[in-house]
Amino acid sequence: MEENKNLNQEDKNKTQVEKVSPEFRYLIAKKLGMTQIFTESGEVKGVTVLEAGPCVVVYTRTKGKDGYNAVCLGYGEKKKNINKPMEGIFKKYGVNPVEHLKEFRFENVESIKPGQIVTLEGRFKEGDWVDVQGITVGKGFAGAMKRHNFSGQPASHGASDRERAPGSLASRRALGRVIPGQRMAGRLGGEMCTIQKVRVEKVIPEKNIIMINGSVPGKPGNIIYLKPTSKKVKVPVQTTTVKSQVKKDSTKAAKKK
Protein backbone atom coordinates (compact mmCIF):
# COMPACT_ATOMS: atom_id res chain seq x y z
CA MET A 1 0.00 0.00 0.00
CA GLU A 2 2.75 2.43 0.92
CA GLU A 3 4.59 1.69 -2.33
CA ASN A 4 1.42 2.40 -4.32
CA LYS A 5 0.96 5.71 -2.48
CA ASN A 6 4.54 6.71 -3.25
CA LEU A 7 4.06 5.84 -6.92
CA ASN A 8 0.86 7.89 -7.07
CA GLN A 9 2.63 10.85 -5.47
CA GLU A 10 5.45 10.59 -8.00
CA ASP A 11 2.93 10.53 -10.86
CA LYS A 12 1.21 13.62 -9.44
CA ASN A 13 4.54 15.43 -9.17
CA LYS A 14 5.33 14.59 -12.79
CA THR A 15 1.95 15.89 -13.97
CA GLN A 16 2.29 19.06 -11.88
CA VAL A 17 5.55 20.15 -13.52
CA GLU A 18 5.19 23.79 -14.57
CA LYS A 19 6.06 25.04 -18.03
CA VAL A 20 7.95 28.23 -18.78
CA SER A 21 5.90 30.93 -20.50
CA PRO A 22 6.26 31.26 -24.31
CA GLU A 23 7.97 34.63 -23.82
CA PHE A 24 11.17 32.70 -23.16
CA ARG A 25 12.09 31.84 -26.76
CA TYR A 26 15.25 29.78 -26.31
CA LEU A 27 15.75 26.04 -26.81
CA ILE A 28 18.41 23.36 -27.03
CA ALA A 29 17.88 21.03 -29.99
CA LYS A 30 19.48 18.04 -31.69
CA LYS A 31 20.11 17.90 -35.42
CA LEU A 32 18.39 14.92 -37.05
CA GLY A 33 19.23 15.54 -40.71
CA MET A 34 18.00 17.30 -43.84
CA THR A 35 15.01 16.79 -46.13
CA GLN A 36 12.71 18.61 -48.55
CA ILE A 37 9.22 19.95 -48.01
CA PHE A 38 6.65 21.60 -50.28
CA THR A 39 5.08 24.92 -49.36
CA GLU A 40 1.44 25.80 -49.98
CA SER A 41 2.46 27.57 -53.20
CA GLY A 42 4.22 24.41 -54.45
CA GLU A 43 7.76 25.66 -53.83
CA VAL A 44 10.37 23.10 -52.75
CA LYS A 45 12.38 24.01 -49.65
CA GLY A 46 15.51 22.26 -48.39
CA VAL A 47 15.18 22.18 -44.61
CA THR A 48 17.09 20.89 -41.58
CA VAL A 49 15.05 18.80 -39.14
CA LEU A 50 15.72 19.53 -35.45
CA GLU A 51 14.41 17.83 -32.34
CA ALA A 52 13.90 20.85 -30.08
CA GLY A 53 13.45 20.08 -26.39
CA PRO A 54 11.92 19.39 -24.05
CA CYS A 55 14.45 21.20 -21.88
CA VAL A 56 14.53 21.64 -18.12
CA VAL A 57 15.50 24.78 -16.21
CA VAL A 58 18.54 23.89 -14.09
CA TYR A 59 19.16 27.28 -12.45
CA THR A 60 18.81 31.02 -13.01
CA ARG A 61 21.22 33.93 -12.70
CA THR A 62 20.14 37.27 -11.23
CA LYS A 63 21.70 40.69 -11.62
CA GLY A 64 21.84 41.31 -7.88
CA LYS A 65 23.73 38.11 -7.09
CA ASP A 66 25.60 37.22 -10.28
CA GLY A 67 25.79 40.53 -12.14
CA TYR A 68 23.54 39.47 -15.04
CA ASN A 69 20.19 37.80 -15.70
CA ALA A 70 20.21 34.42 -17.42
CA VAL A 71 18.51 31.04 -17.52
CA CYS A 72 20.44 27.77 -17.72
CA LEU A 73 18.69 25.03 -19.71
CA GLY A 74 19.49 21.33 -19.66
CA TYR A 75 18.85 18.82 -22.43
CA GLY A 76 19.15 15.03 -22.53
CA GLU A 77 19.38 12.59 -19.64
CA LYS A 78 22.72 11.65 -18.13
CA LYS A 79 22.87 8.43 -16.10
CA LYS A 80 26.63 7.87 -15.63
CA ASN A 81 30.02 9.61 -15.61
CA ILE A 82 28.71 12.56 -13.60
CA ASN A 83 31.54 14.43 -11.91
CA LYS A 84 31.25 15.67 -8.33
CA PRO A 85 30.85 19.41 -9.07
CA MET A 86 27.98 18.83 -11.50
CA GLU A 87 26.40 16.29 -9.17
CA GLY A 88 26.41 18.94 -6.45
CA ILE A 89 24.71 21.46 -8.76
CA PHE A 90 21.95 19.01 -9.69
CA LYS A 91 21.35 18.11 -6.04
CA LYS A 92 21.31 21.76 -4.99
CA TYR A 93 18.52 22.67 -7.42
CA GLY A 94 16.68 19.34 -7.23
CA VAL A 95 17.04 18.55 -10.94
CA ASN A 96 17.80 15.21 -12.58
CA PRO A 97 21.28 15.07 -14.22
CA VAL A 98 21.30 16.28 -17.84
CA GLU A 99 23.80 15.81 -20.65
CA HIS A 100 24.02 19.35 -22.06
CA LEU A 101 23.85 22.72 -20.28
CA LYS A 102 23.58 26.18 -21.83
CA GLU A 103 22.98 29.63 -20.34
CA PHE A 104 20.80 32.09 -22.25
CA ARG A 105 20.64 35.78 -21.34
CA PHE A 106 17.07 36.70 -20.41
CA GLU A 107 15.82 39.67 -18.39
CA ASN A 108 12.55 38.45 -16.86
CA VAL A 109 13.82 35.60 -14.69
CA GLU A 110 11.53 36.24 -11.70
CA SER A 111 8.85 33.80 -12.85
CA ILE A 112 11.31 31.10 -13.98
CA LYS A 113 12.30 28.49 -11.40
CA PRO A 114 14.53 25.37 -11.45
CA GLY A 115 12.69 22.24 -12.52
CA GLN A 116 10.32 23.97 -14.96
CA ILE A 117 10.02 22.56 -18.47
CA VAL A 118 10.63 24.42 -21.74
CA THR A 119 8.79 22.85 -24.69
CA LEU A 120 8.43 23.77 -28.34
CA GLU A 121 4.68 24.33 -28.13
CA GLY A 122 3.76 28.01 -28.51
CA ARG A 123 7.42 29.11 -28.55
CA PHE A 124 8.16 29.13 -32.28
CA LYS A 125 5.80 29.13 -35.23
CA GLU A 126 6.03 28.97 -39.00
CA GLY A 127 7.46 32.17 -40.45
CA ASP A 128 9.54 33.13 -37.40
CA TRP A 129 13.16 34.21 -37.82
CA VAL A 130 15.76 32.62 -35.53
CA ASP A 131 19.51 32.47 -34.99
CA VAL A 132 20.98 28.96 -35.09
CA GLN A 133 24.22 28.17 -33.25
CA GLY A 134 26.27 24.98 -33.33
CA ILE A 135 29.72 23.45 -33.79
CA THR A 136 30.81 22.91 -37.39
CA VAL A 137 32.06 19.60 -38.75
CA GLY A 138 35.72 19.08 -37.87
CA LYS A 139 37.87 18.40 -40.95
CA GLY A 140 41.30 18.05 -39.36
CA PHE A 141 44.50 19.59 -40.71
CA ALA A 142 43.77 21.24 -44.07
CA GLY A 143 45.87 23.07 -46.63
CA ALA A 144 45.64 26.74 -47.55
CA MET A 145 43.48 26.11 -50.63
CA LYS A 146 40.81 24.16 -48.75
CA ARG A 147 40.96 26.23 -45.57
CA HIS A 148 41.07 29.76 -47.08
CA ASN A 149 39.82 29.16 -50.64
CA PHE A 150 43.14 30.05 -52.27
CA SER A 151 43.20 29.60 -56.06
CA GLY A 152 46.65 27.96 -56.19
CA GLN A 153 49.58 28.73 -58.48
CA PRO A 154 50.13 28.01 -62.18
CA ALA A 155 51.53 24.60 -63.10
CA SER A 156 53.58 25.87 -66.06
CA HIS A 157 57.14 27.30 -66.29
CA GLY A 158 58.69 24.49 -64.29
CA ALA A 159 56.60 25.04 -61.14
CA SER A 160 54.85 21.68 -61.21
CA ASP A 161 55.31 21.10 -57.48
CA ARG A 162 53.82 24.47 -56.41
CA GLU A 163 50.22 24.09 -57.63
CA ARG A 164 48.68 23.86 -54.14
CA ALA A 165 51.35 25.81 -52.22
CA PRO A 166 50.23 28.87 -50.22
CA GLY A 167 52.84 31.13 -51.79
CA SER A 168 54.88 33.85 -50.10
CA LEU A 169 54.29 34.28 -46.37
CA ALA A 170 56.12 37.54 -45.59
CA SER A 171 58.49 40.19 -46.86
CA ARG A 172 62.16 40.10 -45.90
CA ARG A 173 62.64 43.87 -46.25
CA ALA A 174 60.07 45.18 -43.74
CA LEU A 175 59.79 43.02 -40.64
CA GLY A 176 61.60 39.88 -41.68
CA ARG A 177 59.06 37.61 -39.98
CA VAL A 178 55.60 36.14 -40.52
CA ILE A 179 52.97 38.57 -39.27
CA PRO A 180 50.38 37.08 -36.85
CA GLY A 181 47.11 36.31 -38.61
CA GLN A 182 48.71 35.15 -41.84
CA ARG A 183 46.41 32.71 -43.62
CA MET A 184 48.19 29.37 -43.66
CA ALA A 185 47.45 25.66 -43.42
CA GLY A 186 46.01 24.45 -40.12
CA ARG A 187 43.06 22.96 -38.28
CA LEU A 188 39.75 23.40 -40.12
CA GLY A 189 36.27 23.17 -38.61
CA GLY A 190 35.18 22.16 -35.14
CA GLU A 191 34.35 25.76 -34.19
CA MET A 192 31.25 27.43 -32.83
CA CYS A 193 29.32 28.99 -35.71
CA THR A 194 26.17 31.13 -35.69
CA ILE A 195 23.85 31.45 -38.70
CA GLN A 196 21.67 34.52 -38.29
CA LYS A 197 18.15 35.21 -39.47
CA VAL A 198 17.02 31.75 -40.58
CA ARG A 199 13.34 31.15 -41.33
CA VAL A 200 11.26 28.53 -39.54
CA GLU A 201 9.45 26.56 -42.26
CA LYS A 202 7.42 24.07 -40.23
CA VAL A 203 6.74 23.17 -36.58
CA ILE A 204 5.32 19.88 -35.23
CA PRO A 205 4.98 20.60 -31.47
CA GLU A 206 3.55 17.19 -30.48
CA LYS A 207 6.75 15.53 -31.77
CA ASN A 208 9.12 18.37 -30.74
CA ILE A 209 10.13 18.79 -34.40
CA ILE A 210 11.09 22.11 -35.95
CA MET A 211 12.25 22.52 -39.56
CA ILE A 212 14.70 25.30 -40.39
CA ASN A 213 15.28 26.64 -43.90
CA GLY A 214 18.69 25.70 -45.29
CA SER A 215 21.64 24.08 -43.55
CA VAL A 216 22.66 24.11 -39.90
CA PRO A 217 26.21 23.78 -38.49
CA GLY A 218 27.39 20.29 -37.61
CA LYS A 219 26.49 16.75 -38.54
CA PRO A 220 23.39 14.75 -37.51
CA GLY A 221 23.36 14.26 -33.75
CA ASN A 222 25.02 17.60 -32.97
CA ILE A 223 23.58 19.95 -30.35
CA ILE A 224 22.03 23.15 -31.73
CA TYR A 225 20.99 26.30 -29.86
CA LEU A 226 17.88 28.18 -31.02
CA LYS A 227 17.17 31.79 -30.09
CA PRO A 228 15.33 34.81 -31.57
CA THR A 229 17.26 36.56 -34.29
CA SER A 230 19.24 39.67 -33.40
CA LYS A 231 18.83 40.99 -36.94
CA LYS A 232 16.15 43.43 -38.01
CA VAL A 233 13.03 41.75 -39.40
CA LYS A 234 10.93 43.69 -41.86
CA VAL A 235 7.24 43.78 -41.03
CA PRO A 236 5.14 43.29 -44.19
CA VAL A 237 3.10 46.38 -45.03
CA GLN A 238 -0.61 45.65 -45.23
CA THR A 239 -2.23 47.50 -48.10
CA THR A 240 -5.75 48.78 -47.53
CA THR A 241 -6.77 48.54 -51.18
CA VAL A 242 -8.14 45.21 -52.38
CA LYS A 243 -8.14 44.05 -56.01
CA SER A 244 -11.93 43.78 -56.09
CA GLN A 245 -12.26 47.32 -54.72
CA VAL A 246 -9.85 48.62 -57.36
CA LYS A 247 -11.95 46.96 -60.09
CA LYS A 248 -15.14 48.53 -58.71
CA ASP A 249 -13.53 51.98 -58.62
CA SER A 250 -12.29 51.60 -62.19
CA THR A 251 -15.75 50.54 -63.45
CA LYS A 252 -17.38 53.50 -61.67
CA ALA A 253 -14.89 55.88 -63.26
CA ALA A 254 -15.59 54.38 -66.72
CA LYS A 255 -19.39 54.79 -66.27
CA LYS A 256 -19.03 58.44 -65.31
CA LYS A 257 -17.09 59.12 -68.50
Image: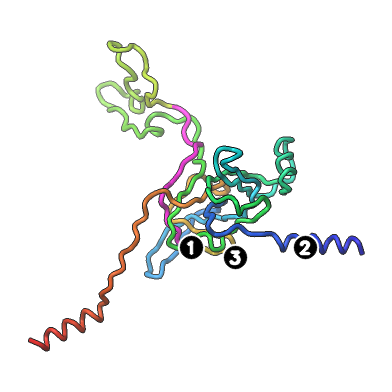
Callout 2: SS: helix
Could you say which disc has been placed on residue 206 in the image?
A: 3
- The answer to which of marks 2 and 1 sits earlier in the sequence is 2
Secondary structure, magenta segment, majority class? strand
- The answer to which of marks 2 and 3 sits earlier in the sequence is 2
Q: Decide whether residue 101 is among the magenta residues.
A: no
Quadrant in which the C terminus is drawn: bottom left
Q: Identify the residue position indicated by label 2 in the image.
A: 11
Establish if 155 lies above or below 33: above
Q: Nearer the viewer, residue 60 or 200?
A: 60
Would you identify the image quadrant in which residue 256 lies? bottom left
Q: Which residues are magenta?
A: 186-201
Q: Identify the residue position indicated by label 1 in the image.
A: 125
Q: Residues under labels 2 and 1: Cα distance?
A: 31 Å
Disc 2 marks a residue whose amino acid type is: Asp
Q: Residues within 10 Å of mark 1 (few under 14, many from 20)?
A: some
